[in-house]
Amino acid sequence: TKLIYAFGRGRAEGDARQTALLGGKGAALAEMSRIGLPVPPGLTLTSDVCRQFYEGGHVLPAGLMGQVKAGLATLGAQTGQRFAGTTAPLLLSVRSGAARSMPGMLDTVLNIGLNDETVVALGANSGDPRFAFDSYRRLLQRYGDTVMGVDQGVFEEIVREACHDAGVESEAGLAASALKSLVARFKAAIEAEAGMPFPQDAHTQLSGAISAVLSSWMSSRAIAYRRLNDIPEMPGTAVTLQAMVFGNRGRHSATGVAFTRDPSTGERRLYGEYLPGAQGEDVVAGTHTPLALTDAAPSSAERPAGRSLARAMPETFKAFAAACDRLERHYRDVQEVEFTIEEGRLWILQTRRAKRTAQAGLRIAVEMVDEGLINEREAVSRVDPASLEHLLHPMVDPNGAVDVVAAGLPASPGAAAGEIVFTSEEAMARAAKGIATVLVRPETSPDDIRGMNAAEAILTTRGGMTSHAAVIARGMGKPCVTGAASLRLDVEAGRLTGGGFDLKAGDIVTLDGSGGRVLAGTVEMIKPEPSGAFARLLGWADTIRRLRVRGNAETPADARAAHRFGAEGIGLCRTEHMVFEGERARLMREVILAPDEAGRRASLAELLPLQRADFVELFEIMQGQPVTIRLLDPPLHEFLPGSEEEITEVARGMRVPAERLRRRIAELGESNPMLGHRGCRLAISYPEIAEMQAQAILEAATEAAARTGAPVVPEIMVPLVSLRRELDFVKARVDAVAEAVAVQTGIRVEYLVGTMIELPRAALRADAIAETAEFFSFGTNDLTQTTLGISRDDSAAFLPDYLREGIIERDPFVTIDVDGVGDLMRMASERGRAVRPELRLGISGEHGGDPASIRFCEEIGLDYVSCSPYRVPIARLAAAQSAI
Ligand code: PEP
Ligand code: MG
């Protein structure tokens, strides 16, 4: 098979569609070559090479280097250079390129082909020996580390000494002669540490670098990143060998990264950073704070004064802006573009779909429709539903009082407070205990991924808007501030000082990622109102989707939120949540403690008007939309106090002896409460409870209809049914109550009686149950628990092990286990509808707000999904996407 694809000079083998084979980078380079953008020519080794590398036990496929050699000969002919030649040496970058971008996770080696001889030729040809030795020392430093396993600290120490001897601050201040002796010391260090010399032979260097890049695919950090981001192991990474262009070649050279629109806000303007006289990854590594591309870029007080690229090199900038425009139109999406300027000449090194904040993603999608670049369906399909949740996340209240510790760059929006931690390990350790943290680092490296994931927010004292920390945090939707240079950070001592504050690990700070500020303590936060773009996109989604979306709500506040976010009714009102507090809780406890039915009925009669008023309010808020009210579900002991203290207090409030309360609590104790006396079993033991609830619901419906004029059709739902006769029993009671209410009020309201399908037997016998039930609501929380036999309350103790070992791919309590639980749902839907074609089908477990599960609900033809109010927008968008 063909293992190598060439590109450059307006031509290419392969194109943008071949990301699996050529990697994102290889495919983009091929595409850019085709459309005539200035791309240094090169060769891409396909992901097949990676597969064969691992199959063969970490050796390069036989014959690969022969094919590479032939490809390089052609490349050399095009550039007028020769790889391993001594007069006009062709130098190469060796870069990874996975099908999906894994920023900074995989290795890269630049300047391959430099050795003691070619460095002299490079110096002579360029007339700049300093630049040549700077490139050589970069090669040694990276190759020594990545390929030969020499600790980076060894090189850093040597650099420190050299800078100290020369009396300069960084390697940028070293003269040619100093760099030359640095090279000598690097070589000696490599030989001492690795036990063999740095290879002078260019081909040996090249095969070493290719192997190293391939090996980095299986580094622990790359594996961790793939797990976190759901990236499959195969196909592996492609490897691109590309003719070097030098951003570190004199004053008119530079390297940088740009976004064709602002990745934080989505504003349409070229946005980015560059570093003059720098190479490759200096920008993304976050080790230097770069300069802005244009003068309009937001800056903080800490940003070093410097000239924008637009001002420093106006002609080159203009060419670059035009290239960016071209790329955005070509790909019809915002691009992140890496570029290098070598002596005033522009080269594009990579383009990829830009990572963006939720806010930016939304704005970009909507504005691109306005610009005619994409249509509405495309806009709807582009926005990640889960990202909408970030838009509703808290912000620092602009009117609240704050103490500013430092200002930095607003690298990723939103705000979060937490305890300061200085290491990723600490962030993970505290997260395991449920403690919110803010991870503070000089800069982050790919090794910090897990720590960043564990922290609520990330603060770095160095780095820019495109640093590793910034890019990753935006992807994770976490607030991030970078380049807070006024802070003095001593990781060893665990101290962070600045702005008159002296902070240590465990102190609380709030990170304002939208304003680029570090604030002392916790501050007032507000929930933002959804923007105009938000409403427009969801409006388009509503015209596309078939599935209806309801909210799970019982309090007026939740119902209002659900309504405001566009819910088309309430899919689950858990009545137990309405009696967990205050007077209602007291009455409920009286019901439970009553010695007989008469006693229970007396307390229920007192509870009735309170419940009725709650339902009236709910119906009014929902303005005639359907409301599904579920009869009492939890085991009764959940209403009783737990601790001794509470028992004494409750007993006093109820004027009963504490001893009696204690005895009743003991009586109600169960070994397996979730499989115990709950759900419809309560209604069978104590029908008077269900009767009171039915009466409250029906009277409320009568009252609300009279008040608002909008007819309410309450849907009364029976939980935890597994036998048709259970449902028959409860329905008969409800119907009798309805009849009595109609007689008494003279008004006959319409209502439905249905059931949750949340036990496997109910799913299996759905046909029989549908003879009684007028609707089904899949209770996938319990259905998952009972189908898998995994306690929903205890799964956290072992499911992470299952995920880590790959025994399951997703937490079944988050995303429906399609093969098992999903099969039951499909079967129940079919069997139920076979008996009652108009049977209304919904889902009200947590899965109702999970995009992947919503897709499945669409597939099996449910009528609606119901989820928590804040997830309603997510569900609207996900429902539309599953209909596209
Ligand atoms: C369910 O089991 O999925 C459900 C919605 O009910 P609850 O979570 O209240 O048990
Ligand atoms: Mg349930």
Image (cartoon, helix red, strand yellow):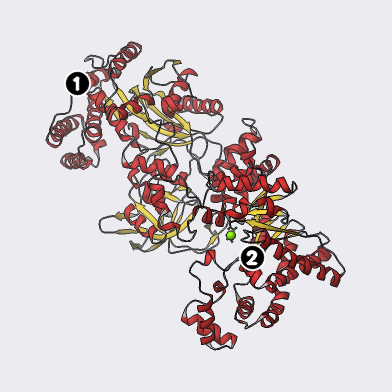
The part of the image, by quadrant, that contains residue 377 is top right
Q: Which residue is mark 1?
A: 201
Residue 113, picture quadrant: top left
Residue bearing mark 2:
680
Q: Relative to 676, is 471 on the left or the right? A: left
Image spot of residue 98 (x, y percent): 40, 31
| Residue 111 position in % (x across, y down) | 28, 26
Image spot of residue 688 (x, y percent): 70, 74
Percent x, y of residue 210 = 29, 26
Q: Residue at x 84, y 64 (%)?
A: 748
Task: Respond yes or no on whether mark 1 lies under 8 Å from ligand 1.
Answer: no
Quarter where residue 467 is shown: top left
Looking at the picture, tell me which residue is in the foreground, 653 or 504: 653
At label 1, the amino acid type is Asp
Residue 502 in view (yes/no): yes
Q: How would you rate the neighbour count of disc 1 (Cα within 10 Å): few for under 14, some for 14-19, many for 20 or more?
A: few
| Image position of 423 (left or right of 527) | left
Mark positioned earlier in the residue sequence (2 or 1): 1
> Rounded to the nearest whole Å, what is the CA distance between mark 2 and mark 1?
79 Å
Ligand 1: quadrant of the figure: bottom right
Q: Is residue 49 above or below residue 161?
A: above
> Between residues 525 and 561, which one lies in front from this camera angle?
561
Q: Secondary structure at mark 1?
A: loop
In contact (CB < 8 Å): disc 2 and disc 1: no
- Looking at the rendered image, the quarter that the C terminus falls into is top right
**In this rendering, position of residue 191 left or right of residue 485:** left
The label on residue 235 is none
Callout 2 secondary element: helix
Q: Amino acid at mark 2?
A: Cys
Q: Residues within 10 Å of mark 2 (few under 14, many from 20)?
A: many
Residue 407 visible? no
